[in-house]
Structures are given as C-alpha cells and as structure tokens.
Amino acid sequence: MPEVLKAPLVVEFPFTRSLGPVQSAFLTGLRERVVLGVRTGDGRTLVPPVEYDPVTAEEIRDLVEVAPTGTVTTWAWNHAPRRAQPLDTPFAWVLVKLDGADTALLHALDAPGPDAVRTGMRVRIRWAEERTGAITDIACFEPYEGRAEPAGHDGRFDDLVTGIVAPARLDYVYSPGRAQSAYMEALSERRTVGERCPSCRKVYVPPRGACPTCGVATFEAVEVGPRGTVTTYCIVNIKAKNLDIEVPYVYAHIALDGADLALHGRIGGIPYDQVRMGLRVEPVWTADGRHPDHYRPTGEPDADYDVYKELV
C-alpha cells in the first residue's frame, strides 16, 4: 500500500479592526482596570457590551461600570492548554456573571484542578501586569469569596483605544488523499496531471477524486499544460509575512491547456501592470522546487476570450 501523505500546515494572519464607541470604551476600561457594561432600554446590563440590543436591535450607548468579582455560571476543564491560550498550565474555561451584570463573560479560571471548580463559585479578575487595551488585560479569573464594589466610572477616558489587531491562526495536519497525492507526485516530476470525469468528460486540475459537477468518482489521469492562459487575476499590494516576494505582484487564475478548471499561480517575468486576461504563460521551476515557482509569458499571442470565458 502506498504511503499516506500528510503534512502539518498553518494558516495565520493578523485581523485588524476598528472599534466603535462602546467597544472602544470597554477595552480602554480594561487597560485602566475598569470593567464596563452597557445598559439596555429595559434595564439589563450586558457584559461584554454590545452596540445594539440583541432583543430589540436598538442602539445602546449607556455605559455602566460593573464589579471585577462575580459568579461562575458554567465551566469546562482544559487539561491541555494550546499555544497562546491565557494560561500555560491546565485551567478551566468559565462563564462568569460579574456583580452588576446580567450576562456572562467567557475567560480562563486559574484553579489547581477540576475538583476545585464548581458552578456558583465566587471569583475575581486577576489583571495582567502590562495592559494595552485588549481582552488579554484580564490575565484570568481566580477563586475569591469576597465582593468588590464598582467605583461608578462613567466610561469616559482621555486616551481611547480605537483599534485592535487580533492574530488568527489555525494549525492542522493535511492529508491529500489518493487523487491529490498522485497530482503532487507528478509535480515532483515537473508534470501536471488532472483527472477526467467519466460523465461530463471535464478535466479537473488539481484533481479532487470526484467531479464537483456530477458527483461521480474520477480515476482517469490526464496530463495537461504545461502552458496555459490567464483567465483573471489580482494585484497584491500587501506583503505577506514570511513570503520573500516584493509587492506589488500578480496572482492569477491560470487555465492550463487541456484543463477545464483554472488553478492559482503567481505571474512573473513581466511588469505587474502589463498582466492581462488572455495572457499566455508557462511554468518556471526552481532547482529543487516541487511545484512551479511562478508563471511567465510565453511570447505567444493572447488567447481569444471565447476560448477561456467559461473558466473565468
């Protein structure tokens, strides 16, 4: 039996967002060790605050301070913390209804073990030593039997936090399966191989093992390319982390000759503002590359739009 291919992959990007007046006050408050909620028209206090009432959809701006102490409403034990979680030792995820709030806040509870956690237990916020205006300004919750009283902050600050950058990351192990394993094996030989649907006769590259249109299994291998046609493209102006390519550059959909599905590829060997739909291109390989590094113009006349319009 052939070896099953697999590889660890990471999808990671920084998510940048601006803050409205309510979220801005909430995160600025955390920086100043103040927890703010927002009061609805019927008198409920929501923590964390939102800008619109989830029941009536009414805009709400009435900020009110709540206590840094509260009660656990439910919990789950995390026996194996993952990268970038609040604590690096086992802890409990808890929903805590802070004193003065009508909704619960999700965060970590530092406890010696699951036997030390219970619904209804009293806790308080443990503040991070360095605070920047983010939810991580709450380092975690910790057991506490007392009750603190809020000072009655009105939610007005001189130096508001107006935006945050939240890193998003997904770690996973990818196993390509039969069809894509054969595709990658062919790429290692500098060939591009797709599979033909026995029903509609379309050739799909990269192959999925089944026709996305007909839903039937595909097994017939078909070599395509190596040349192809740019069907559509975009100009990339933001440099990606850990990618040694100077911006701007062009990323395109390329319909290889003989294929009925366009694949992705970077266009090089031509100024970015000269790339166009219909441009004829060919792959460029590096010495030890397992896939084309980029595609460059072949010098042929551009393809007629009618030839590739179904692949745009």
Image (cartoon, rainbow, N blue to C red):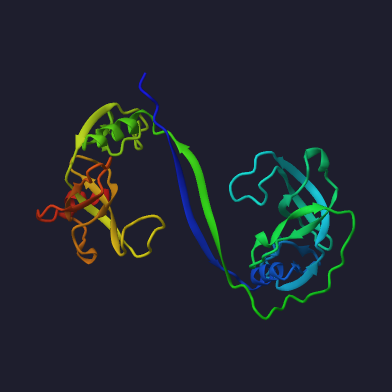
Q: Quadrant of residue 27?
A: bottom right
User: Which residue is found at the position 23% from the left and 66% from the top?
Assistant: 273
**Depicted 61 relative to depicted 283: above or below:** below
Left or right: where does residue 280 sit relative to residue 261? Answer: left
Residue 239 on image: x %, y %: 37, 62
Quadrant of the drawing holding the N terminus: top left
Q: Quadrant of residue 289?
A: top left
Residue 222 on image: x %, y %: 22, 32
Residue 263 on image: x %, y %: 29, 46
Left or right: where does residue 284 sit relative to residue 96? Answer: left
**Depicted 153 relative to depicted 35: above or below:** below
User: Which residue is found at the position 19% from the left and 38% from the top?
Assistant: 224
Left or right: where does residue 227 sit relative to residue 144? Answer: left
- For residue 230, say whether it is visible: yes
Q: Quadrant of residue 80?
A: top right
Residue extending farthest top: 1
- Considering depth in this image, is 155 or 122 the residue closer to the camera? 122
User: Which residue is found at the position 66% from the left and 52% from the top?
Assistant: 86
- For residue 202, say whether it is visible: no
- Considering depth in this image, is 303 or 164 the residue closer to the camera? 164
- Considering depth in this image, is 175 or 48 the residue closer to the camera? 175
- Considering depth in this image, is 261 or 72 the residue closer to the camera? 72
Residue extending farthest left: 300
User: Which residue is found at the position 82% from the left and 42% from the top?
Assistant: 116
Residue extending farthest right: 146
Residue extending farthest front: 129
Residue 230 on image: x %, y %: 22, 53
Number of on-image labels? 0
